[in-house]
Image: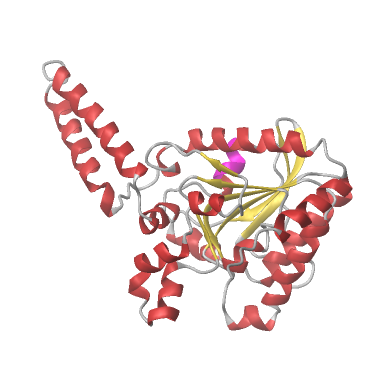
């Protein structure tokens, strides 16, 4: 059971829910009408709050520690998953998890970032920030998928690629660039799911696909709000201001035609109901995959090329 964690803007709802629990403890029979009224008010309050989140608040929801990660989705969306390890060059990066699985009985290749729910796992997964060997492992699995004609499903949730000296020495930029080039060429369907943070090239390295799905309260940007603020104003504390400028929410990114579909989250965010968001995401993946399977390999490659070529916006 995950430890309860509440964001600052959720506090009014949390206080109301605590009051409801107190009344239930005292006398649920005698106070039935009052409890029902408060429960209805709590639902309405949560709906109103999450319908009007700022971009910075959305970023906080995307980073919520109880939000489901790749292994949580694998357990509820796929069956027969077998994890494969190593890049056959340097080592096994625990921030990237991947392997064959079945979606609705059909074989697919699942690859994605994995963060950690507790301190021990966060350190083990390097907080979801891959080294070059992580991206090379992902590429190895994607090449295997093409060899066996398996659709590729990727899950994106990372602050960014790991910026350590060792990562740079082992070719972090080259590993990301190679993934971008090769993903553009694969002759099998690729569906990308942005489930939390889509941070910079660390996210894009497994996000070149035919269909890009984005959860309602996830974010996708070239840099984190804090990193942007540190560069522009030499003050990382101005992350909220930077988030507004970055326009990093699902609605923003959909308006820019960078993604194809926004997947609805439960009221209050994916962390409130793992089963519900897994069901919504599974339905979206399945529907898009069936559509992509009607296309020839040549149509997939050409469509992917055209999709990314038209993403730019120019103002003269």
Tell me the quarter of the image containing the N terminus.
top left
Which residue shows up at 55% across the image and 49% down it?
A: 254
Which residue shows up at 19% across the image and 37% down it?
A: 16
Question: Could you tell me residue 176's position as x and y percent?
Answer: 70, 69
Which residue shows up at 30% across the image and 49% down it?
A: 6
Q: Compared with residue 276, is residue 81 higher up or lower down, i.e. above or below?
A: below
The range drawn in magenta is 72-76
For residue 200, which quarter of the picture? bottom right
* Front residue (pair 31, 126): 31
Q: Is residue 74 magenta?
A: yes
Q: Compared with residue 164, is residue 204 higher up or lower down, i.e. above or below?
A: above
Tell me if I can see residue 68 in this picture: yes
Query: Number of labelled discs?
Result: 0
From the viewer's perspective, tell me whether residue 263 is left or right of residue 171: left
From the viewer's perspective, tell me whether residue 90 is left or right of residue 234: right
From the viewer's perspective, tell me whether residue 52 is left or right of residue 180: left
Q: Is residue 221 magenta?
A: no
Question: Could you tell me residue 304's position as x and y percent?
Answer: 76, 53
Question: Could you tell me residue 93's position as x and y percent?
Answer: 65, 65
Tell me if I can see residue 87 in this picture: no
Which residue shows up at 40% across the image and 75% down it?
A: 229
For residue 227, which quarter of the picture? bottom left
């Amino acid at each position: 059971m995950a430890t309860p964690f509440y964001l600052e803007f959720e506090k009014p709802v949390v206080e109301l829910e605590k009051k409801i629990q107190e009344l239930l403890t005292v006398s649920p029979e005698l106070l039935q009408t009052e409890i029902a009224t408060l429960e209805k008010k709590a639902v309405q309050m949560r709906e109103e709050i999450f319908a009007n989140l700022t971009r910075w608040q959305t970023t906080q929801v995307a980073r919520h520690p109880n939000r489901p990660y790749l292994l949580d989705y694998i357990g509820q969306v796929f069956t027969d998953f077998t994890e494969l390890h190593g890049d056959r060059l340097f080592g096994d990066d625990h921030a990237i998890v991947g392997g064959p699985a079945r979606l609705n009985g059909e074989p697919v290749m699942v690859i994605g970032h994995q963060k950690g729910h507790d301190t021990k796992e966060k350190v083990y997964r390097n907080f979801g920030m891959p080294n070059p060997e992580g991206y090379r492992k992902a590429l190895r699995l994607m090449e295997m998928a093409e060899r066996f004609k398996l659709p590729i499903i990727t899950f994106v949730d990372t602050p960014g690629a790991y910026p350590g000296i060792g990562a740079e020495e082992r070719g972090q930029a080259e590993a990301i660039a190679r993934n971008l080039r090769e993903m553009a060429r694969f002759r099998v369907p690729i569906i990308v799911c942005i489930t939390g943070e889509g941070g910079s090239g660390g996210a894009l390295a497994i996000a070149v696909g035919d269909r890009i799905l984005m959860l309602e309260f996830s974010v996708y940007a070239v840099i984190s709000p804090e990193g942007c603020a540190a560069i522009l104003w030499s003050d990382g504390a101005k992350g909220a201001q930077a988030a507004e400028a970055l326009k990093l929410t699902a609605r923003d990114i959909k308006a820019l035609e960078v993604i194809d579909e926004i997947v609805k989250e439960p009221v209050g965010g994916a962390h409130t109901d793992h089963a519900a968001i897994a069901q919504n995401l599974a339905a979206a993946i399945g529907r898009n995959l069936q559509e992509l399977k009607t296309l020839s390999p040549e149509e997939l490659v050409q469509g992917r090329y055209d999709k990314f070529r038209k993403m730019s916006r120019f103002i003269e």
